[in-house]
Image (tube, rainbow, N blue to C red):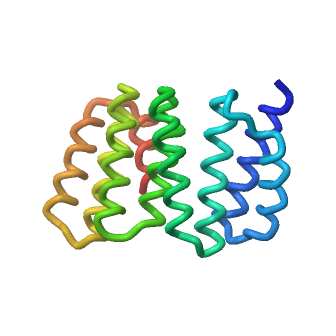
Amino acid sequence: GDDATFVSGASGVVLCLALTGEPLAAGSWLEEARAKAQLEDPDAWTRFQLASGALLVAEGLDVRGVERLQEAYAYALAGQRWSLAMQAAQLAAASSEGEAKLQAGRQLLAAAEASGEATWIAAAHDSLGWIHDALGDQDAAVASFDRARRLLAGRSLSERVRVEWAYG
C-alpha cells in the first residue's frame, strides 16, 4: 500500500544520506519511516532495517549498526529477497573488521548463490576478493578474483561491466 511505498522510498533516502555522511538529515527521514514500517510488509520492513543499520553506522555506532544489518540479512534471506540480503551483507562487510568482515563477505556469497544469478555470484566472489585483500590474505584474494572472472567468461559485456561496476 501507500505506507509500504513511503517506507521503501524514505528508507532509500536514509540509506543514501547515511552513506554520504549526512546522518542528521537521515535521522528525520528514518523517524517518518519508523512510524509507518510494518513487519507484515516484508520488502519495506527489510529496507527499513537496512536503512536503520546504515544510519547507526554513520552515527558511529558500528556494532549496533552491523547487528541491525545482520538482522536485515537474516530476514531478507529467510524471505528469499536475495538482492536485499546481498545489500545487507555488503554493508555489514564494509562496516566490519577482521573475521566479522570475512563472515559478512561469505554471507554475501551465500545470498548470491541462493539467487542462482551468475553475475551476482561473480560479483560476490569479486567482493570477497577485496575483503581478503583488505585482511592481507593475498592468496585467497587472487583465488576469489579468479573465480569471479571464470564465472564471467563468455558472458556479455553488460554482465561483465555490471560486476566490475558493482564491486570494483
* Residue 141 in which image quadrant: bottom left
Residue 144 higher or lower than 56, as above or below: above
Q: Residue at x 81, y 66 (%)?
A: 25
Q: Nearer the viewer, residue 160 or 79?
A: 79
Q: Which residue is drawn at 68% across and 71% down?
A: 21
Q: Residue at x 21, y 44 (%)?
A: 147
Percent x, y of residue 121: 34, 37
Residue 16 higher or lower than 121, as above or below: below
* Residue 28 in which image quadrant: bottom right
Percent x, y of residue 1: 82, 24
Tell me: 155 left or right of 56: left
* Residue 65 in which image quadrant: bottom right
Residue pushed farthest bottom? 60
Total labels drawn = 0
Percent x, y of residue 32: 85, 50
Residue 27 higher or lower than 68, as above or below: below
Percent x, y of residue 125: 30, 47
Q: Nearer the viewer, residue 108 or 139?
A: 108
Tell me: 16 left or right of 160: right
Tell me: 50 left or right of 133: right
Residue 90 higher or lower than 63, as above or below: above
The quadrant the C terminus occupies is: bottom left
Q: Residue at x 20, y 49 (%)?
A: 146
Residue pushed farthest left? 139
Q: Nearer the viewer, residue 92 or 123?
A: 92
